Amino acid sequence: MGDTAALLFSVLMDTLGYWWVMIPTIFLGLIVGGIPGFSAANTIIILMPLTLAMDLQMGLVFMVTLYCAARMGAGIPAILVNIPGTAGAAATPLDGYPMTKQGRGQQALSISFVSSAIGGLLTTIIALAAMPLLARVGFYMHAVEMIVVMLFGISLIASIAAQDMIKGLIAGFLGLMIGSIGTDVVYATPRGTMGFLELYDGVPLIPALVGLFAVSEAFIIIEKKVILSKKGQEAMENPSWAATFEGVREALVRWKHIVWTSIIGLVIGVIPGAGASIASFVAYQQSRTFSKTPEKYGTGHIEGLIAPESANNGVTSGTLVPLLVLGIPGGATAAIMLVVMQYHGVSFGPSLFQRQPEVGYGMFMAMAVSYLLMMLTIIPLSRYMSRVTTVPTIYLAPMIISFTLVGAFVPREYMFDMYLALAFGVLGYIARRTGYHVAAILIGVILGPLLETYFLRALKKSEGDITVLFSSTIGNILWVALVVSLILPAVFDRRRKRKELVTP
Amino acid sequence: MKIDPDRPPRHLGGELIIPALAVVFTLYFFSTIWNSPWTAQVSAFSLGGVLLLLCVIFFAKALGMVAKGEGSLTFGNVVTYEDLRTGRLGLIVTTVGYCWLIDDLGFTLATFLFLWLSMLVLSRFRGVGRVTLTSAIMALGGWAIFIWAFDTRFPRGWFEATMEAVLKNG
């Protein structure tokens, strides 16, 4: 115990010594996270020669910091201009953007930064302490259990649909159908591709995200001079530090909410392939389910912003657990880290913490230190970042379109993806103008192919027996939890209405 | 049937666009998997079946509303005079042009032209100097960050090629 403590202290000191690498990397991460198409994974690949030239510890510090900062950065445009930087931040604008329109963008940014940093820091500590236990989560999560986890995310469509049930469900199921485009996972039969070879791998997420959120939003915002409401403009006329501190305080008083939603992110992050988008949707849905004021979600509710932000940062530490303990990367960025670490001769598995403990603990320490540094460096910037919302839309809309459309091109380098983003933009524009929720369509596009993959895997294993979905203990517990989480809001709602009748 | 003057009729024509697209797309999707193995069909048929059912319910509901005078089959919520007044149609045209030209002109030049033209359209051709300066700064800034500094594989044209040659040869 004493040896481990001494080792951790020594690793902490070494990591702090790299502050000069971490601070510029934080700003780089915020930029690449904020622009759709420029994920941390892409940036690490672009800077791979630089990373390989660094010594192992510096390279790890650089990659981990970039990873965390990009995750946090993705929330900034989601809050300020309704454009999530990555799919992991797709649930953030549901409540973040309405806050901005009310002139509370500065508070929203502070809330997002605090919940991201605390959520990330806390889950890093939990992951460090409970690594052997968490690593086993991946072993217990098979196709059936994953189907139920996906359904937790998809059930958010039902929440979104609450205002107009049929339209919400049509949007969600259309998204699921669009997500089914591509070759089937068993025989590679092309389905719904309209003859485009570029769609054989399925609908790429970034063009869908860019089109549904950014392009359609740009076509909408030009109706006003600035994106803020009149009240919002008045609030933004005299930005002050008080608004930043108000946001920090509002997040801190909801520390319990940060804790449990970030743990949802950690557990989902541990499951290889699950990722931040599922975690943020599940966390948002669960937050709404157990809220005393579910009707406020979607109107600029603080808990609705905290849940996805702390969950998607909880995922960052979760993805490192299977990487370090089992050598299985939990996501794209973790896979690239694996390549860099293997280049430096690092061997993964339980022996890593015996042979090279400074590497295993060093990654978590780098994550913890980067979250602390981010809190100190980014929160003061929220006052200035929120000024973006005062830029006239005649400048803002064309900038959004040009940079996000090129962002759609970057991941695969197909011109086709720019046209695809434009097509999604038109779909998103029609959806917004006619009362269909673009987030419901996006949830379908993200989760549709994953759900199909796990569904087929379960059916193949059981030779087509559908009852396999209820064949595992953990799966059945999750089914019960899913049903309870769908029924509870109605029960709470009825109880609340009864109370209102009793005490008018 | 009396129409409530406080609640204007809904433009159901616009609201039916997405369900109509969904029906067309789902039927097309079914046609591509009709003779496929069951693994390619099972998910799409179940999801598509639910989607078709939802669309049929919505069509029936919309027709009912039209019959009661609560809605009309118009598109006033999608296409309006505002599209011309705000320059939205112009922005759509310049955006399509941007996608079309960027492969030939390269990122920097195409972005400058797109920003310049669309900002002018949206500002009704006022403040030409400011618009030109903003467009130039944004396009050159994008080139400096994404192409010069990070060497990302953005679409490249003669500007990028010229700058590369200039920077290489000092």
Image: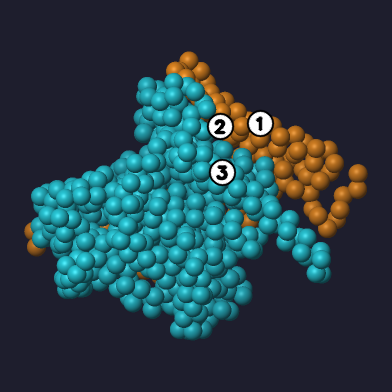
User: CA gap, disc 1 to disc 2?
Assistant: 10 Å
Q: Residue at x 76, y 64 (%)?
A: A499
Residue B31 screen position, x and y as percent = 52, 21
Label 1 or label 2, whichever comes before in sequence order: 2
Residue A298 screen position, x and y as percent = 59, 60
Query: Are there few (<14), some (14-19), or many (20+) residues within 10 Å of tag 2?
Result: some
Q: Residue A459, relative to residue A65: is it above or below?
A: above
User: CA gap, disc 1 to disc 3?
Assistant: 27 Å
Q: Nearer the viewer, residue B167 or A164?
A: A164
Which chain is in orange here? B
Are marks 3 and 2 in one subunit?
no
In the picture, the disc for residue B47 is: 2
User: For this view, does B151 lie left or right of residue A469?
Assistant: left
Label 3 belongs to which residue? Answer: A480
Label 1 belongs to which residue? Answer: B53
Is residue A423 visible in the rendered image? The answer is no
* In this rendering, the label closer to the viewer, 1 or 3: 3
Looking at the picture, which amino acid does disc 3 mark?
A: Val
Q: Quadrant of residue A188?
A: top left
Query: Are there few (<14), some (14-19), or many (20+) residues within 10 Å of tag 1?
Result: few
Which chain is in cyan here? A
